[in-house]
Amino acid sequence: MPSVSDASSGPEYPCAVTVDDFERNIASVQARIAAAAERSGRDASEIRLLPVSKTVGEDRVRLAVQAGCRELSENNVQEAKRKHGNLADLDIRWSVIGHLQTNKARDVAAFAAEFQALDSLRVAEVLDRRLHAAGRSLDVYVQVNTSAEESKYGLEPAAVPAFVAALPQFTALRVRGFMTLALFTADTPRVRGCFRLLRTVRDRARDTDPDLIGPGELSMGMSGDYEVAIEEGADCVRLGQAIFGARTTANDLYWPTPTKQ
Ligand SMILES: *Cc1c(COP(=O)(O)O)cnc(C)c1O
């Protein structure tokens, strides 16, 4: 099965090294977002583009900010914390989009505006405690595993109702909706199936108790599959390579290797 980088690195992800390059990459992504929105009868202005700056050096991140990026996201807490500190002179809203261990929750509570990979009540509890101590709050997305065999992270869809029902006790967390990573495959119908499943999970949660999921947004879609995600209802797409350029780092660094059974 091709990995994301096998399937998608290359000339279609030109590396941005000047402000102009970033403006060009962002404009081309926005045009494709607009086209996907139009195809599915949606308003492109309601779709949030969240740039993913993981592995990108701070000098290039500064150029992206000059080109108009006001929000950035990172998969790794340490890397996010370092960039937050070194780029503190810029006005950036930071989102952490990767799996979190409880011992890193303090860091996230200190600088992040948003956390998109909530899948454990223990992490929710530690975040909430740290946030109260710091007098802060945090937007959160509940991560759902929609590709069962490919990823260890995220809740099973069946576990979502009980999980969201337990979140209101954590008053510093503001639930925004759900996040997922689709299967890493060029097989579009299977990718689409993952996005549809997240939408179904959201719709069911909304039918049960809309107050538990806030606006019930769907964060889904990356550089290789965001147009499909938009067609299936994505409210937030998380794009790294399409904005910054092809990433050479192995994806295994960010996602657990699929377990072969
Ligand atoms: C890296 C990453 C992305 C972006 O992937 P690209 O292929 O660079 O667009 C999106 N979501 C998560 C959770 C990631 O770790």
Image (cartoon, rainbow, N blue to C red):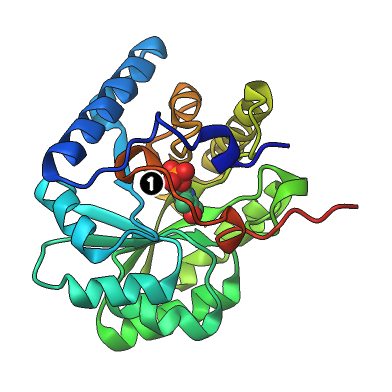
Q: Left or right: where does residue 169 sit relative to residue 151?
A: left
Q: Provide residue 180's location: percent of width, then percent of height.
A: 55, 46
Residue 43 falls in image quadrant:
top left
> Is 146 drawn above or below residue 40 in the view shown?
below
> Is 8 drawn above or below residue 173 in the view shown?
above
> At 39% across and 49% down in the image, what residue appears?
214
> At 30% across and 80% down in the image, what residue appears?
110
Evaluate whether residue 56 shows in this view: yes
Is the distance from the Cβ of mark 1 to the nearest ligand 1 atom less than 8 Å? yes
Q: Provide residue 30's location: percent of width, then percent of height.
A: 26, 27
Q: Nearer the viewer, residue 106 or 142?
A: 106
User: How many callouts does the rendering have?
Assistant: 1
Q: Provide residue 186's location: percent of width, then percent of height.
A: 63, 28
Q: Residues within 10 Å of mark 1 (few under 14, many from 20)?
A: many
> Quadrant where the N terminus lies?
top right
What element does badge 1 sit on? loop
Q: Amino acid at mark 1?
A: Gly
List the residue tagged with mark 1.
240
Q: Nearer the viewer, residue 241 or 11?
A: 11
Q: Provide residue 105's location: percent of width, then percent of height.
A: 45, 79
> At 38% across and 85% down in the image, what residue appears?
130
> At 25% across and 34% down in the image, what residue appears?
25
User: Given the current orientation, which residue lies at the most extreme right position?
Assistant: 261
